[in-house]
Amino acid sequence: MGLDKRTIKVDERSIQLLFGQFDKNIRKIEKAFDVTYVYRGDELILEGDERMVAKAEQVVNDLLVISKKGKDITDQNVDYAISITNSGEGGKVSDLENDDELICHTLAGRPIRPKTFGQKKYCEAIDNNMIIFGSGPAGTGKTYLAMAKAITAFKKGEVERIILTRPAIEAGEKLGFLPGDLQSKIDPYLRPLYDALYEIMGAESFQKNMEKGLIEVAPLAYMRGRTLDNAFIVLDEAQNTTESQMKMFLTRIGFGSKAIITGDQSQKDLAQGTKSGFDIALKVVRNIDGIAICNLTSKDVVRHPLVQRIVEAYEKYDSQKPKKK
Protein backbone atom coordinates (compact mmCIF):
# COMPACT_ATOMS: atom_id res chain seq x y z
CA MET A 1 0.00 0.00 0.00
CA GLY A 2 1.23 3.50 -0.88
CA LEU A 3 0.79 6.81 0.87
CA ASP A 4 -2.48 8.66 0.60
CA LYS A 5 -3.98 12.02 1.52
CA ARG A 6 -7.66 12.72 2.27
CA THR A 7 -9.27 16.14 2.69
CA ILE A 8 -12.45 16.53 4.74
CA LYS A 9 -14.48 19.75 4.84
CA VAL A 10 -15.29 20.73 8.44
CA ASP A 11 -17.10 23.78 9.86
CA GLU A 12 -15.71 25.60 12.91
CA ARG A 13 -18.18 24.24 15.48
CA SER A 14 -17.78 20.65 14.28
CA ILE A 15 -13.98 20.86 14.35
CA GLN A 16 -14.07 21.94 18.01
CA LEU A 17 -16.23 18.96 18.96
CA LEU A 18 -14.22 16.59 16.78
CA PHE A 19 -10.84 17.61 18.16
CA GLY A 20 -12.03 17.63 21.78
CA GLN A 21 -10.34 19.24 24.76
CA PHE A 22 -6.60 19.68 24.11
CA ASP A 23 -7.12 17.88 20.75
CA LYS A 24 -7.44 14.55 22.58
CA ASN A 25 -9.96 13.04 20.14
CA ILE A 26 -8.03 13.72 16.95
CA ARG A 27 -4.77 12.64 18.59
CA LYS A 28 -6.39 9.35 19.57
CA ILE A 29 -7.42 8.80 15.92
CA GLU A 30 -3.97 9.81 14.75
CA LYS A 31 -2.34 7.26 17.06
CA ALA A 32 -4.82 4.45 16.34
CA PHE A 33 -4.27 4.53 12.57
CA ASP A 34 -0.71 5.91 12.44
CA VAL A 35 -1.76 8.92 10.36
CA THR A 36 -0.92 12.60 10.61
CA TYR A 37 -3.41 15.45 10.40
CA VAL A 38 -3.27 19.10 9.36
CA TYR A 39 -6.11 21.57 9.88
CA ARG A 40 -6.28 24.55 7.51
CA GLY A 41 -9.24 26.89 7.35
CA ASP A 42 -12.23 24.62 6.88
CA GLU A 43 -10.24 21.57 5.77
CA LEU A 44 -8.92 18.62 7.76
CA ILE A 45 -6.16 16.80 5.88
CA LEU A 46 -5.22 13.22 6.80
CA GLU A 47 -1.99 11.65 5.52
CA GLY A 48 -0.49 8.19 5.86
CA ASP A 49 -0.80 4.62 4.61
CA GLU A 50 -3.63 4.38 2.09
CA ARG A 51 -5.60 1.75 4.02
CA MET A 52 -5.16 3.50 7.36
CA VAL A 53 -6.08 6.92 6.01
CA ALA A 54 -9.32 5.42 4.65
CA LYS A 55 -10.12 4.04 8.11
CA ALA A 56 -9.29 7.32 9.84
CA GLU A 57 -11.50 9.18 7.36
CA GLN A 58 -14.34 6.78 8.12
CA VAL A 59 -14.04 7.44 11.85
CA VAL A 60 -13.83 11.22 11.38
CA ASN A 61 -16.91 11.32 9.14
CA ASP A 62 -18.84 9.15 11.61
CA LEU A 63 -17.97 11.46 14.51
CA LEU A 64 -18.82 14.55 12.45
CA VAL A 65 -22.36 13.22 12.01
CA ILE A 66 -22.69 13.18 15.82
CA SER A 67 -21.45 16.77 16.06
CA LYS A 68 -23.91 17.89 13.37
CA LYS A 69 -26.73 16.47 15.49
CA GLY A 70 -25.68 18.97 18.14
CA LYS A 71 -24.34 16.28 20.47
CA ASP A 72 -20.99 16.18 22.25
CA ILE A 73 -18.42 13.64 21.08
CA THR A 74 -17.47 11.54 24.11
CA ASP A 75 -14.35 9.45 24.74
CA GLN A 76 -16.56 6.38 24.42
CA ASN A 77 -17.79 7.55 20.98
CA VAL A 78 -14.20 7.89 19.75
CA ASP A 79 -12.98 4.60 21.24
CA TYR A 80 -15.93 2.62 19.89
CA ALA A 81 -15.74 4.22 16.43
CA ILE A 82 -12.07 3.22 16.23
CA SER A 83 -12.85 -0.28 17.51
CA ILE A 84 -15.64 -1.12 15.04
CA THR A 85 -13.68 0.41 12.14
CA ASN A 86 -10.63 -1.71 12.98
CA SER A 87 -12.74 -4.85 13.35
CA GLY A 88 -14.39 -4.36 9.94
CA GLU A 89 -17.76 -5.36 11.40
CA GLY A 90 -19.53 -2.35 9.90
CA GLY A 91 -21.97 -0.01 11.57
CA LYS A 92 -21.66 3.63 12.55
CA VAL A 93 -21.46 5.06 16.04
CA SER A 94 -23.59 7.98 14.90
CA ASP A 95 -26.50 5.54 14.36
CA LEU A 96 -26.55 4.93 18.12
CA GLU A 97 -27.04 8.65 18.83
CA ASN A 98 -30.51 8.79 17.27
CA ASP A 99 -33.38 9.97 19.45
CA ASP A 100 -35.31 6.74 18.85
CA GLU A 101 -32.55 4.86 20.71
CA LEU A 102 -33.13 6.92 23.86
CA ILE A 103 -34.38 4.91 26.85
CA CYS A 104 -34.70 7.67 29.46
CA HIS A 105 -32.76 10.42 31.23
CA THR A 106 -31.04 10.29 34.59
CA LEU A 107 -32.18 12.65 37.33
CA ALA A 108 -29.32 14.95 36.29
CA GLY A 109 -30.61 14.99 32.69
CA ARG A 110 -28.02 12.66 31.16
CA PRO A 111 -29.52 10.59 28.33
CA ILE A 112 -29.37 6.81 28.66
CA ARG A 113 -29.16 4.92 25.39
CA PRO A 114 -27.24 1.90 24.08
CA LYS A 115 -23.64 2.84 23.35
CA THR A 116 -22.63 -0.22 21.34
CA PHE A 117 -24.37 -2.43 18.79
CA GLY A 118 -24.30 -5.31 21.26
CA GLN A 119 -26.16 -3.13 23.75
CA LYS A 120 -28.61 -2.10 21.03
CA LYS A 121 -29.47 -5.76 20.32
CA TYR A 122 -29.85 -6.31 24.07
CA CYS A 123 -32.32 -3.41 24.35
CA GLU A 124 -34.28 -4.65 21.32
CA ALA A 125 -34.46 -8.12 22.90
CA ILE A 126 -35.85 -6.56 26.10
CA ASP A 127 -38.54 -4.77 24.10
CA ASN A 128 -39.59 -7.88 22.18
CA ASN A 129 -39.41 -10.74 24.70
CA MET A 130 -40.85 -11.73 28.07
CA ILE A 131 -37.65 -13.21 29.53
CA ILE A 132 -34.20 -11.97 28.57
CA PHE A 133 -30.83 -13.38 29.58
CA GLY A 134 -27.99 -10.87 29.40
CA SER A 135 -24.57 -12.49 29.61
CA GLY A 136 -21.30 -10.59 29.48
CA PRO A 137 -18.26 -9.25 31.34
CA ALA A 138 -18.14 -6.33 33.75
CA GLY A 139 -18.80 -2.89 32.29
CA THR A 140 -21.04 -3.94 29.40
CA GLY A 141 -24.12 -2.22 30.86
CA LYS A 142 -26.16 -5.40 31.44
CA THR A 143 -27.64 -4.32 34.76
CA TYR A 144 -27.73 -0.57 34.16
CA LEU A 145 -29.69 -0.84 30.90
CA ALA A 146 -32.03 -3.39 32.50
CA MET A 147 -32.68 -0.93 35.34
CA ALA A 148 -33.29 1.91 32.88
CA LYS A 149 -35.79 -0.24 30.96
CA ALA A 150 -37.53 -1.27 34.19
CA ILE A 151 -37.89 2.30 35.47
CA THR A 152 -39.11 3.53 32.06
CA ALA A 153 -41.76 0.78 31.87
CA PHE A 154 -42.88 1.60 35.43
CA LYS A 155 -43.18 5.33 34.74
CA LYS A 156 -45.19 4.64 31.57
CA GLY A 157 -47.59 2.41 33.49
CA GLU A 158 -46.66 -0.68 31.50
CA VAL A 159 -46.04 -2.56 34.77
CA GLU A 160 -47.39 -1.99 38.29
CA ARG A 161 -44.14 -2.56 40.16
CA ILE A 162 -40.42 -3.17 39.89
CA ILE A 163 -38.75 -6.10 41.62
CA LEU A 164 -34.96 -6.15 41.81
CA THR A 165 -33.16 -9.14 43.21
CA ARG A 166 -29.81 -10.88 43.39
CA PRO A 167 -28.41 -13.84 45.31
CA ALA A 168 -26.92 -12.74 48.64
CA ILE A 169 -23.54 -14.40 48.35
CA GLU A 170 -20.14 -13.18 49.48
CA ALA A 171 -17.83 -12.26 46.60
CA GLY A 172 -14.96 -14.54 47.51
CA GLU A 173 -14.51 -12.99 50.96
CA LYS A 174 -15.86 -13.90 54.39
CA LEU A 175 -17.62 -10.77 55.58
CA GLY A 176 -18.50 -12.19 58.98
CA PHE A 177 -21.28 -10.81 61.18
CA LEU A 178 -23.06 -7.73 59.85
CA PRO A 179 -24.74 -5.48 62.46
CA GLY A 180 -28.25 -4.04 62.30
CA ASP A 181 -31.71 -5.29 61.33
CA LEU A 182 -32.46 -7.63 58.43
CA GLN A 183 -32.59 -4.80 55.86
CA SER A 184 -29.20 -3.52 57.03
CA LYS A 185 -27.72 -6.99 56.66
CA ILE A 186 -28.85 -7.49 53.06
CA ASP A 187 -28.32 -3.91 51.79
CA PRO A 188 -24.57 -4.36 51.08
CA TYR A 189 -25.37 -7.18 48.65
CA LEU A 190 -27.93 -5.03 46.85
CA ARG A 191 -26.00 -1.74 46.81
CA PRO A 192 -25.27 -1.78 43.02
CA LEU A 193 -29.02 -1.92 42.36
CA TYR A 194 -29.67 1.00 44.73
CA ASP A 195 -26.94 3.05 43.02
CA ALA A 196 -28.61 2.71 39.63
CA LEU A 197 -32.04 3.49 41.09
CA TYR A 198 -30.80 6.65 42.79
CA GLU A 199 -29.08 7.89 39.62
CA ILE A 200 -32.03 7.31 37.30
CA MET A 201 -35.04 7.80 39.58
CA GLY A 202 -33.69 9.85 42.46
CA ALA A 203 -33.49 8.84 46.13
CA GLU A 204 -36.71 10.61 47.16
CA SER A 205 -38.85 9.09 44.40
CA PHE A 206 -37.33 5.67 45.06
CA GLN A 207 -38.07 5.84 48.79
CA LYS A 208 -41.69 6.90 48.22
CA ASN A 209 -42.33 4.06 45.77
CA MET A 210 -40.51 1.58 47.99
CA GLU A 211 -42.68 2.56 50.98
CA LYS A 212 -45.78 1.98 48.84
CA GLY A 213 -44.48 -1.46 47.86
CA LEU A 214 -44.21 -0.46 44.20
CA ILE A 215 -40.45 -1.02 44.16
CA GLU A 216 -38.93 -3.99 45.91
CA VAL A 217 -35.23 -4.73 46.33
CA ALA A 218 -34.67 -8.11 47.94
CA PRO A 219 -32.43 -11.18 48.02
CA LEU A 220 -33.38 -13.99 45.64
CA ALA A 221 -34.39 -16.27 48.52
CA TYR A 222 -37.38 -13.97 49.16
CA MET A 223 -38.87 -14.85 45.76
CA ARG A 224 -39.71 -18.43 46.75
CA GLY A 225 -43.42 -19.22 46.91
CA ARG A 226 -44.50 -16.04 45.13
CA THR A 227 -46.16 -15.39 41.76
CA LEU A 228 -44.94 -12.15 40.22
CA ASP A 229 -47.67 -10.65 38.02
CA ASN A 230 -47.60 -7.26 36.25
CA ALA A 231 -44.01 -6.63 37.32
CA PHE A 232 -40.68 -5.78 35.74
CA ILE A 233 -38.19 -8.11 37.42
CA VAL A 234 -34.40 -7.85 37.25
CA LEU A 235 -32.27 -10.72 38.59
CA ASP A 236 -28.69 -9.48 38.82
CA GLU A 237 -25.48 -11.51 39.39
CA ALA A 238 -27.34 -14.60 38.22
CA GLN A 239 -24.09 -16.53 37.69
CA ASN A 240 -24.17 -17.02 41.48
CA THR A 241 -27.50 -18.84 41.50
CA THR A 242 -27.73 -22.59 41.94
CA GLU A 243 -29.73 -24.73 39.53
CA SER A 244 -32.67 -24.96 41.96
CA GLN A 245 -32.64 -21.20 42.63
CA MET A 246 -32.77 -20.38 38.92
CA LYS A 247 -35.59 -22.84 38.30
CA MET A 248 -37.47 -21.37 41.27
CA PHE A 249 -37.05 -17.83 39.91
CA LEU A 250 -38.08 -18.62 36.34
CA THR A 251 -41.25 -20.33 37.53
CA ARG A 252 -42.28 -17.27 39.63
CA ILE A 253 -42.90 -15.08 36.57
CA GLY A 254 -46.61 -14.39 36.04
CA PHE A 255 -48.91 -12.64 33.57
CA GLY A 256 -48.01 -9.14 32.37
CA SER A 257 -44.46 -9.44 33.67
CA LYS A 258 -41.04 -9.12 32.07
CA ALA A 259 -37.84 -10.56 33.56
CA ILE A 260 -34.23 -9.74 32.80
CA ILE A 261 -31.57 -12.09 34.12
CA THR A 262 -28.01 -10.77 33.99
CA GLY A 263 -24.77 -12.57 34.75
CA ASP A 264 -21.04 -12.67 34.14
CA GLN A 265 -19.96 -16.27 33.59
CA SER A 266 -16.34 -15.38 34.31
CA GLN A 267 -17.03 -14.14 37.87
CA LYS A 268 -18.68 -16.91 39.88
CA ASP A 269 -18.58 -16.91 43.70
CA LEU A 270 -20.32 -20.26 44.20
CA ALA A 271 -18.84 -22.97 46.40
CA GLN A 272 -16.37 -25.21 44.60
CA GLY A 273 -18.15 -27.94 42.69
CA THR A 274 -21.51 -26.11 42.59
CA LYS A 275 -22.90 -25.69 39.08
CA SER A 276 -24.19 -22.25 38.13
CA GLY A 277 -27.94 -22.09 37.57
CA PHE A 278 -27.29 -19.32 35.03
CA ASP A 279 -25.03 -21.55 32.91
CA ILE A 280 -27.54 -24.41 33.01
CA ALA A 281 -30.50 -22.15 32.17
CA LEU A 282 -28.73 -20.77 29.10
CA LYS A 283 -28.64 -24.33 27.73
CA VAL A 284 -32.10 -25.40 28.88
CA VAL A 285 -34.24 -22.47 27.67
CA ARG A 286 -32.37 -21.31 24.57
CA ASN A 287 -34.98 -22.66 22.11
CA ILE A 288 -38.12 -21.46 23.92
CA ASP A 289 -40.16 -18.77 22.16
CA GLY A 290 -40.44 -15.57 24.16
CA ILE A 291 -37.00 -16.02 25.71
CA ALA A 292 -33.98 -14.18 24.31
CA ILE A 293 -30.31 -14.73 25.10
CA CYS A 294 -27.94 -11.82 24.51
CA ASN A 295 -24.20 -12.33 24.74
CA LEU A 296 -22.33 -9.08 25.29
CA THR A 297 -18.56 -9.13 24.85
CA SER A 298 -15.48 -7.07 25.70
CA LYS A 299 -16.33 -4.91 22.66
CA ASP A 300 -19.43 -3.74 24.54
CA VAL A 301 -17.53 -2.52 27.61
CA VAL A 302 -18.40 1.13 28.10
CA ARG A 303 -16.23 1.94 31.11
CA HIS A 304 -12.70 3.31 30.86
CA PRO A 305 -10.80 1.79 27.87
CA LEU A 306 -8.41 0.23 30.38
CA VAL A 307 -11.30 -1.91 31.71
CA GLN A 308 -11.87 -3.24 28.20
CA ARG A 309 -8.20 -4.18 27.89
CA ILE A 310 -8.29 -5.88 31.30
CA VAL A 311 -11.37 -7.92 30.29
CA GLU A 312 -9.70 -8.93 27.01
CA ALA A 313 -6.50 -9.90 28.84
CA TYR A 314 -8.43 -12.15 31.24
CA GLU A 315 -10.38 -13.70 28.35
CA LYS A 316 -7.08 -14.52 26.65
CA TYR A 317 -5.65 -15.91 29.90
CA ASP A 318 -8.74 -18.08 30.53
CA SER A 319 -8.71 -19.41 26.96
CA GLN A 320 -5.13 -20.65 27.45
CA LYS A 321 -5.89 -22.55 30.65
CA PRO A 322 -6.00 -26.34 30.30
CA LYS A 323 -9.64 -27.43 30.27
CA LYS A 324 -10.86 -29.56 33.16
CA LYS A 325 -11.95 -33.03 32.22
Image (spheres, rainbow, N blue to C red):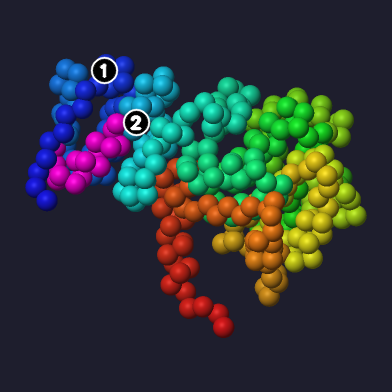
Residue 181 versus residue 72: which sits nearer the camera? 72
Mark 1 neighbour density, 10 Å: few (under 14) some (14–19) many (20 or more)? few
The C terminus, quarter of image = bottom right
Q: Is residue 43 left or right of residue 305?
A: left
Q: Are marks 2 and 1 in contact (CB under 8 Å)?
A: no
Can residue 136 be seen in the rendering of this structure?
no
Residue 80 position within the rendered picture, expressed as x and y whole percent measured from the top left? 39, 41
Which residue lies at the image location 59% right of the left edge and 42% below the top edge? 124
Which residue lies at the image location 54% right of the left edge and 45% below the top edge? 121
Can residue 265 be seen in the rendering of this structure?
yes
The amino acid sitting under disc 1 is Asp
Q: Is residue 257 left or right of residue 195?
A: right
Looking at the rendering, the stretch of residues picked out in magenta corresponds to 47-61
Which residue lies at the image location 54% right of the left edge and 28% below the top edge? 100
Residue 307 versus residue 51: which sits nearer the camera? 51
Find out whether residue 60 is within the magenta segment.
Answer: yes
Magenta segment's dominant SS is helix
Find out whether residue 99 is within the magenta segment.
Answer: no
Residue 70 position within the rendered picture, expressed as x and y whole percent measured from the top left? 41, 19
Q: Callout 1: helix, strand or loop?
A: loop
Which residue lies at the image location 51% right of the left edge and 78% below the top edge? 323
Q: Residue furthest bottom?
A: 325
Q: What's the mark number on residue 63?
A: 2
Residue 146 position within the rendered picture, expressed as x and y whole percent measured from the top left? 65, 42
Please report whichever mark, 2 or 1, sits nearer to the chain's N-terminal start.
Answer: 1
Q: What's the mark number on residue 11?
A: 1
